[in-house]
Amino acid sequence: MNKNYLLLLALFSFESHAQSVDFNQLYQTWSGEKATVSSAAKGKELWGYELIPGKSCSTCHGDNLSQTGSHVKTNKLIKPLSPKANSKRLTKVRKINKWLKRNCKFTYKRECTPEEKVSFIEFIRNN
Amino acid sequence: MLRKYISVVLFFVVSFFALQSQSDSSLWRYFGGESKGVAVVQNDLYQEECGACHFAFQPGLLPARSWNRLMSRSELTDHFGEDIAFDDQVVFNDLLKYLTVNAADQSSYKRSRKITRSLGANDAPLRVTDTPYIIRKHREIPNRLIVQKEVGSIANCEACHKSADKGSFDDDNVRIPNSGFFKSWDDD
Amino acid sequence: MSVAQSTTLSEQETIINIMVRVFHWSIIVLFVLLFVTGDNNDGSDALHIVSGHLLVSFLLARMLWGMIGNENARWKNYLYYPKQIISYLAQLFDTTLVHKFQLHNPAGSSMILLMMGVLSITAITGLLLESLFEFSGVLLFATAYFNNDSALLIREVHGILAYLMLFAIGFHVAGVLYSSFLYKENMSSMMMTGKVSFLKKEEV
């Protein structure tokens, strides 16, 4: 009885650990894209790019991801995007996919390419 | 003569009750503790999905027909210029249910009732600020105070309504940025 | 003519009926409450609206009393031709004349009618505003006939009338003070007690 209980507890501890997203696996699901050394740098480059004038990632999230941003249309405050500043960031796969879709539609009026998505996530992870 | 006294006093009492009975601001409502404002948002999913980019407008601010319209496919792909259509049907269903069950025309909260009564039966505005009740409440505010940097637009409730997240939009908790101590718009 | 013009008023005779007196002092309290609550806010608070409803009820009751009540309170006593009003006003400041006590002289009566009128229209616009801005109250059906601009116009009118009433009250108080001086009578306390405080002697 005790052994089983401990096993169960051990399993649960893995589930509830904060940093549970397997990024490589995640990138795999995006048409087999892989992260490269230059992904984060590419992400940084894209961060301030305004495909639509006045709408880049940085417009709402700022260039410094540890700071609070604000929505360009509504002025609503946005909590820091950096996982170092905000422990809830990049912890749920569903949310990562949802926000990438919604925000790429916001800035590019289309979904991001797998390459773009990897670049962005790598950039956020490393800042 | 006594009959005349009685009849006039009765007339007074009846007219007062007649006026009060049709009113939201009656003595018995006041002492009976009716629900002021609108019901607060008590749904984490709604707060997250809809309150991330803008103020989480309480469902009690619009009638169910407005929420149904807003959540239609065509409106979601053009949500005030943005495409926010949901992939997750479960999330979509839960949100729609939350909104319509707690809509203004389903609520007994004071502001919800007034919003509902100010609308025609077929009116289904998409904007909270497009109901006659709310339009008239904000009509006299000078445009410069709405477009100023600290506010931005009339949709930014929290900029001035400091208790908006608690469902209270009372004048007592309104502080318009840069409007000075006295109402400065008579001399606008 | 009314009892007030008799030259032998006794101290015990009540010439102002209790209904009229209660009405008078009640609407003073209500008007102060209404003015203060209306000026600060947009008049949507419960105190303003409940006081307004009370005021309407008082006005209606007084109007009814003026039709069926005691002799002195009847509205017919307040009606004078413009010529009468003007000629009365002309001799009012003539200090060579001895002025006979008259409870409802042309000047005072006209002032009262004017105040009833202004107060009534203010009250009606107030009820209308309750429907136009709060979407509640007995005049809710009227919202169909007003758009946003005309609703705001009614609000302006309501405010102007309230200040007009204030102005009229100023005039009224001035008149009360002057007639107190003229008749050597404390008119305000008479409005409280309903009785004259002097024994009327023979007057010219």
Image (cartoon, coloured by chain):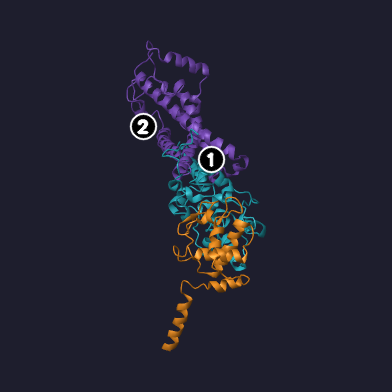
Which residue is more in the foreground, C154 or B179? B179
- Marked residue chain, label 1: B
| Above or below C94: residue A8 | below
Q: CA distance from mark 2 to mark 1?
A: 51 Å
Image chain in cyan? B
Residue C83 coordinates in the image, percent (x, y): 52, 16
Q: Secondary structure at mark 2?
A: helix
Discs 2, 1 touching: Cβ within 8 Å: no
- Marked residue chain, label 2: C
Colour seen for chain A: orange
Mark 2 or 1, which is nearer the eye?
1
Image chain in purple? C
Does residue C106 show up? yes
Where is residue A3, by image quadrant? bottom left
Classify mark 2: residues with Cα within 10 Å, few (<14), some (14-19) or many (20+). some
Identify residue type, mark 2: Met
- Report which residue position mark 1 lands on: B143
Task: Name the residue rendered at 38%, 12% in the picture.
Answer: C97
Residue C192, label in figure:
2
